[in-house]
Amino acid sequence: MSRSRITKDIGVLRNKDIYNILLYAIYKCTNDPEYSIISELIYAMDEKSLLKFCSIFGGCTFKVPTLDELKTFTNGLLIYQLMLEGHSFNEAFKATGLPSKQKKELAKVYTTIKDIIDEYEFRQDL
């Protein structure tokens, strides 16, 4: 195998760019499409956070929620809080400002959040 002469000084690269190159190289070497976007993570977090992320989730495959999905579940939590304060589901749903066509979806989200919170053991030492 012939190797081309090295002509670029990586010393001029920022650390984020070096991590981007390393992560992109993993994708190129493995040809695994699940690595295709991982190299962009370094631009969404600092280096320390990226290394911690890799140490915790290395080898895992998961899906990251969209901002719309996160907003839907945030509205579900809002409904939970408003119902805890004594509002009915309908009043709480109205407070979200969402169209009525999303009411069924939010009812499911609310129920899921309620079930999780009912089972959740809150830390008392905070």
Image: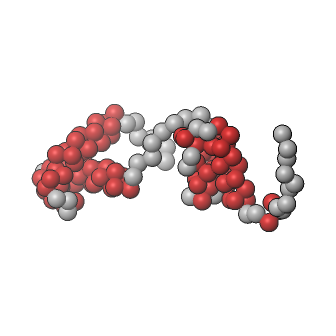
Asked where in the image residue 32 lies, by quadrant, the reply is top right
Vertical placement of 65 versus 112: above or below? Answer: below
Question: Quick check: 51 left or right of 6?
Answer: left
- Count numbered badges in the picture: 0
Q: Residue at x 73, y 59 (%)?
A: 15
Question: For the point 30% across and 42% down, which residue is it?
Answer: 113
Q: Nearer the viewer, residue 57 or 93?
A: 57
Where is residue 69 shown, x and y percent of the image? 34, 51
**On screen, residue 32 above or below 23:** above
The reply, left or right, for residue 75 in relation to residue 54 is left
Residue 125 rendering spot, x and y as whole percentages: 49, 43
Task: State the image coordinates of residue 122 (x, y, percent, origin top left).
Answer: 41, 40
Q: Is residue 86 visible?
A: no
Of 70 and 36, which appears nearest the observer? 36
Compared to 33, does 66 lie above or below?
below
Is residue 109 left or right of 32 when viewed as pictured? left
Whole-percent x, y for residue 67 in the image: 38, 56
Q: Nearer the viewer, residue 123 or 66?
A: 66
Find the residue positioned furthest to the front: 2
Q: Quadrant of the N terminus?
A: top right
Farthest bottom residue?
12
- Can residue 13 be seen in the rendering of this structure? yes
Q: Which residue corresponds to the image point at 76% horizontal and 63% vertical from the top-left?
A: 13
